[in-house]
Structure formats: structure tokens, C-alpha cells
Amino acid sequence: MSTPHRRRRRVVPLSLTVAAAALAAGCTSGPPGTTTPATASPGFPAPPASSASPVSPVSGDTGDPSTWTLPLQAYQPTERQAAAIAAAEGTLVQRCMRSFGKEWRPAPGLPRVGPRNMMDWRYGIHDEALSSRRGYQPDAAEQARYDAAVRTQSRRPAPSPDEEVLLGGSDLPASAREQAGPEVRSGSFNGRKIPAGGCFGQARTTLGSQSRGVSPLVEQLNFASYEASLSDPAVTEVFGLWSACMRKKGYSYAAPMDADADPRFRPDPRRRVSEREIATAVADISCRRRHHVAEIWHGVEVRVQSGYVRENAARLAADRRTLDTVIGNSTHVNGRS
């Protein structure tokens, strides 16, 4: 899942042929071990009433947000589980394609670039050593490996229109189906009926979820809690303190997200990271640390998500059961492959 705070960063579109790789990258993952049963109480501390109050303890290393957790992560696959689900899906799709006389392999997963998981940059940058070299940009070596992998994937042979329908079946838009041959448009391939949703749809049915166990409700609430946290009095107060701190250093931004989203700091492979961007990012981190911006913000979002969990307990418990089914079925498929 893309982190709300980093939505402006580059996102590579995914086709059916790399859908499994997208899941392997852990788009909705949390740190390993966040598989608390849905009936368990999250037990997270309430956020401070204001920035003058003691900072609420976080659920991991205070200086490393990638170790923090949010209540809704109990209803999401971990990164390791997401990779296992992707591998199982790829195996099932490959078997399905072979049954139609077609060889297909999932694209290899893209290397990580930037945040280590969904929490790492959720509240903005925090690595002063990296920012002193790269400002708001990811590590240069990570970015280079990622870009090279994307170029390699772009050179993979594209599936034919018939193969696209076989992979995606009725889930494809009408325009894609119209490009296929008459037999495929009628719902068959090499004399055999195409399964509902194509080979991907069949694989997901076998695993037990058309969303690979990823709960649309959880995804919705994850974004909603981030947006809701922005208007909380404790967060708006600490943003004001951060803004005043930045003004003293010569920078005018109303909130931390505004510095990150400054158009002058947009990623551009044609230029080096500017000294201004680096100086701004270092000042940004200094002011964040001085006023405990991330800790207070995280505490508020924990409180918001804890409320969501209580309000949606039955639906979330059902989604957790579905995810557990998908994890179990994936383990079975991967054990046989």
C-alpha cells in the first residue's frame, strides 16, 4: 500500500503480467509478526492531549518509525505473508496457463526503493544521514537498482491479446477483449472454456479471495485514519510548532507534508539533488525531532484506528478469517510446488 504521505512519489503501473510481483513487494505489508487475531484488543496508548503533554510511547524503536505498528495491521498480511501469497498465485496461474498450452512466468519482484515498509515514511522523513546526502529522495543506489529492474521488466515480451484474456478473463475491460480472436471472445481458448476471471481469477478463487486476502475495508480505513489525523488538535498544534521552528531556520511551510511536496524537490533523474533540498530536509528532521512530530502524529492515528477497529469489529474479524484462509491455502500450494 502506498503511504499517504508519499503519494506524490513515482509509482510504476502494473499489468496483469506483473500483478504477482506487486503483491510480493508488500504493498499492504507490515513488520513480520503483526498477525494478532482479529478478536484481540489492540491495546495501544492514547495520544497526548497536546504537544505540551508527555509524548505517548510508540510500539517500537522511538527513532525508527519502520518498527512502529498501527491497529489495522493486525488485519493485513505481513510482508513475508504477502510474498508467499504472491508466489502461490504465480504458481497457480502458471499451472492454469500450461493447461491451455501456454508457458507463462510471473515477473520477478522489483527491488525495494525508499521506505522499508508502510510505516517507514508514513509520517515523513527521519533518516538524517540519508537526507544529508539525498534530501527527500531515496538512496541513489536503491533508486538505480529499482530503475534498472523496471527497464528489464519493460523488455519482457507482452502477452498477445488472446493471452491477455486468458490471464484476465472477464475482469479485463471490453476494449482488451475486443482485440482478441473470435474463439477467445466467445469464451474459449484452444477448445477449452476460459475460467471466470481468467487464470488469475481461478488462482484467487483457489486461494480463497479475489483480493489475495487484502481487505478493501482495511485499505480504506488506513487512508481515512491518515486523513483524519491531520485535523486532530494535537497534530495541528505540533504542526504549528514545527512550522515556527522551520521559519526560524529560514523556511516557510505550514506543515511537514508541504516541505516534502515542494515542487522544487520533485524527483528528476536529469539533475543532482540540490543543496537547497538537502538543507531543507535536514532542517525538517531537526524540527520534527525537537517537537516529537512523528510520535505525536502516530499516537493520534493509533487512537483513530483503534476506534475504527471497535466500530468495524465484525467485518474486520471476517476479513481476518479470509486472510488466514488465503495464508493457509498459499502455504499448501507453495509446499506442493
Image (tube, helix red, strand yellow):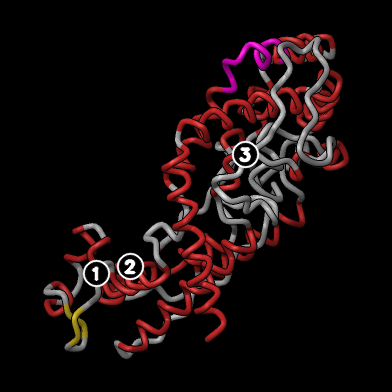
Question: Crowding at label 1, few (<14), some or many (≥20) Cα neighbours within 10 Å?
Answer: some
Q: Secondary structure at mark 3?
A: loop
Q: Look at 33% across and 67% down and name the residue there.
A: 201
In this rendering, the answer to whether 314 lies above or below 323 is above
| Spot occupied by residue 24 in the image (x, y as percentages of width and height) | 57, 63
- Tag 2 and tag 1, C-beta contact below 8 Å: yes
Say how many tags the image has.
3
Query: Does the image show residue 276?
Result: no
Q: Secondary structure at mark 2?
A: helix
Residue in the foreground of this view, choosing between 233 and 287: 233
- How much space separates mark 3 and mark 2, taking CA atoms? 34 Å
Query: Does the image show residue 164?
Result: yes
First in sequence: mark 3 or mark 2? 3
Pointer 3 residue: 41
Pointer 2 residue: 201
Q: Look at 68% across and 32% down and name the residue there.
A: 123
| Spot occupied by residue 89 in the image (x, y as percentages of width and height) | 46, 72
Pointer 1 residue: 196
